[in-house]
Image (cartoon, grey):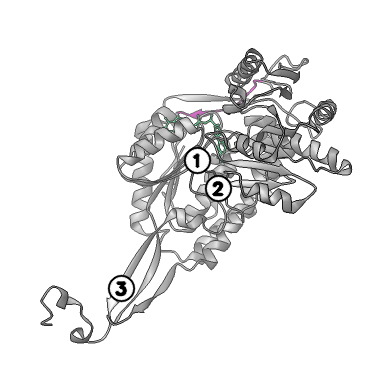
Amino acid sequence: MWIGGVAVDSDERFEIRSPATEELVATVAKGNAGHADDAVAAARASFESGVWREKTPAERAEVLDRVAARIDARNEELAKLQSKENGAPVRIARWVHVGLPAQELRYFAELARTHQWVRPAPALAGMGTGGMVRHEPVGVVAAIVPWNVPLQLAVNKIGPALAAGNSVVIKPDEHAPLMVLELAAELDRAGLPAGVFNVVTGDGEEVGVRLAEHPDVRKIAFTGSTAVGREIMSRASETVKRVTLELGGKGPNIVLDDIAEADLNRVVDGCLFAFLTFSGQGCESGTRLLLPAALHDDFVERMIARIADLRIGLPDSDDTDLGPVFSRAQRDRILGYVESGRAEGATLACGGSSPEGFDKGYWVEPTIFTDVTNDMCIAREEIFGPVVAVIKYDTVDEAVAIANDTIYGLSAGVWSSNTDRAVSVAERIDAGMVWINDFHVLDSRYPFGGMKQSGLGRELGPDALDEYTETKQVTYALGRREETSPYGLLFGGDL
Ligand code: NAD
């Protein structure tokens, strides 16, 4: 762990094993509630001392830029480490798991430089009052992230938190903490003062719960399942912490009936990209595919044919399109949903089991269910695996109604050869992100987050700093009191 600027061990350790080979990758200290308390105390002390929040925004930006440069320089090494730890194909890891966080750190450095931290407020008419609106750091920020894209999800929180001058405690997932520990090392090398960034590696039920409850934590930023998000929000309410939540999804992906023949194969590939990237272990995946009745059979056949071209293999190989799923529990959960889909009467059009040829690790074939209705479990619950539920529709109104009939509202796709028509459908979808003729569009400049039970608040984009700052007015009376004072309201107009 990394607490108060020093490496800290613990009596207990847990093992990190490769999801592809089950080989031991590392052992890591297992922190407890006491370590969480120590980390919060270190963060609070660093915040109160002003070592970081009193630096100029440009000085803070410099540190973030230095870390971004180091992460870029280590891209290949870190992508391989990530791939070992959570099974991400190294091709994806170079871009999403390592490249993107570096880009984001630079973006937040730029925001720190350009943000108007103090804004002059207008003089109030007739009261002779002037002043300013200040954006100040909130204090100690706690971040909790999952295993699927740990560095990027950490940077989504730490980037704006540090740019704004906060001090941070982060708890990575207990099974995938290595990238966040690398980030701690790089922040230290880049000159971040001790105590401003702390990492506690431990269980959600102990360390996570303690952070959500801790009275000195002023804000909690969480990415993970909707069930745990609800718990965190409830715990945080005891001390009225500020909360941002990035939770689950069940992304509808609507193909309209106007796809030109020449575009069809590209749309098929796009819809596979939507649900198969990183074996479907992305919250924003397009896992409910809505196909118009006229296109349905041909489209599904083309998808099955394309899946046969995909290479399932070890994640460290550049030839691999699909790697393993993260854990035995994850695999069993996915295969459990396959059983549930069959039992509810959906048709298994392809996949549905573990592929042959792998003695070790946790693998699931790309899986397509057809004849799905939106009330089935496989259409309502997040599976977090390479499984898509294909739902047939007749009219656009029906497609929009099905798309919105979910507790989630994170992402959606609309595919059409007519952009205006696609935009008019996108406007009717209840989701924080709607992609037209594309999917998984991740860019620092665009706000990321969900509506309904997919979350609260947004990460990235120009407003991200607002989630990590308090807004304070400082006003002062101008001129002579007799002329400007409203005290007469109290003293019967005698002043
Ligand atoms: P999870 O909710 O089980 O765990 C996420 C993190 O929360 C881990 O660090 C875990 O240790 C911690 N945690 C667990 N119980 C806790 C508790 N009671 N109190 C505090 N912390 C606790 O999620 P998971 O299954 O590991 O990850 C997958 C989920 O994350 C999916 O639902 C996925 O959609 C979601 N996700 C969302 C986004 C997004 O940006 N919206 C991104 C990635 C993943």
Q: Amino acid at mark 1?
A: Lys
Left or right: 114 as drawn, with respect to 415: left
User: Can you tell which mark lies on residue 452?
Assistant: 1
User: Can you tell which mark lies on residue 155?
Assistant: 2
Q: Which residue is mark 3?
A: 475
Q: Residue at x 65, y 47 (%)?
A: 426
Image spot of residue 363 (x, y percent): 69, 21
Boundaries of the magenta span: 22-30
Q: Nearer the viewer, residue 86 or 26?
A: 86
Look at the image and tell me in which quarter the C terminus lies: bottom left
Tell me how far mark 2 sits from mark 1, CA to CA: 24 Å
- Note whether 390 is above or below 104 in the view shown: above
Q: Amino acid at mark 3?
A: Thr
Mark 3 or mark 2: which is in front? 3
Q: Residue at x 57, y 52 (%)?
A: 447
Label 2 sits on a secondary structure element that is helix
Q: Nearer the viewer, residue 137 or 306?
A: 306
Q: Is residue 84 magenta?
A: no
Is most of the magenta stretch helix, strand or loop?
strand
